[in-house]
Amino acid sequence: MKIRDFLLFKNLNDNEADFIKPLLKRREFKKGEMVFSEGELGAEMYLIEEGEVRIYLKRGDYNLELAKLGAGDFFGEMALLRVYDRSANVEVLEDSIIHIMSINVFKQIMEKDPNISVKVLTSLCNILADRLAQTNNNLETHFLLNKAILNDKMFRDLYITKNKGK
């Protein structure tokens, strides 16, 4: 996979891509391995060259899947803007090759070639806007489903009757 095949770097020219490539750390992950866990301090973002990961929240005994990402996708991108506690868990679903960019490497890119960082940040903003729009659609769907359940007397009566003896 070429560096420009990553969504984040699709707007770079060949010279810009050649500048970034050696700055990324390549790592292989095995199926079932955790890339990071919710609450850990994060200072890197991850770009998937090969394989698939699952992003999820763990709440008690329940895992809420937020996304599955594959080749060309990235995650942990907020670490390019600031060091923070990770907001989710990331598990490798199949053997994967993942490139890592630290916040320090991104700062180095900004200092050495601001044009590259503008292109990367523009791509990042566009992708995050798309992700936010999808999240908004998901929230609307959940809200409407919950509203329908709350407003449906027959459902409530069935639910209450079924769970009364428990």
Image (cartoon, rainbow, N blue to C red):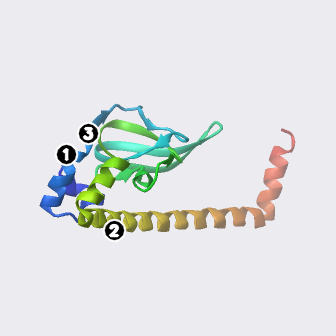
Spatial distance from mark 3 to mark 2, Cα to Cα? 24 Å
Q: Residue at x 17, y 52 (%)?
A: 2
Q: Amino acid at mark 1?
A: Pro
Label disc, if present, on residue 22 of the rendered structure: 1
The kind of secondary structure element at disc 3 is strand
- Residue placed most toward the observer, 14 or 106: 106
Label disc, if present, on residue 26 of the rendered structure: 3
x, y percent for residue 3: 20, 53
x, y percent for residue 20: 21, 52
x, y percent for residue 152: 76, 65
Label disc, if present, on residue 122 of the rendered structure: 2
The kind of secondary structure element at disc 1 is helix
Disc 3 to disc 2: CB gap under 8 Å:
no
Q: Residue at x 33, y 68 (%)?
A: 122
- Residue placed most toward the observer, 10 or 112: 112
As displayed, is residue 68 above or below residue 93?
Answer: below
- Residue placed most toward the observer, 34 or 123: 123
Q: Earlier in the sequence, mark 3 or mark 2?
A: 3
Q: Quadrant of residue 61?
A: top right
Residue at the far front: name it.
111
Q: Amino acid at mark 2?
A: Thr
Q: Earlier in the sequence, mark 2 or mark 1?
A: 1
How many neighbours does mark 3 have within 10 angstroms: few (below 14), some (14-19), or many (20 or more)? some
Q: Residue at x 32, y 53 (%)?
A: 106
The kind of secondary structure element at disc 2 is helix
Disc 1 to disc 3: CB gap under 8 Å:
no
How many neighbours does mark 1 have within 10 angstroms: few (below 14), some (14-19), or many (20 or more)? few
x, y percent for residue 142: 62, 62
For the residues carrying marks 1 and 3, which lies nearer the camera in this image?
Answer: 1
Residue at the far right: name it.
165
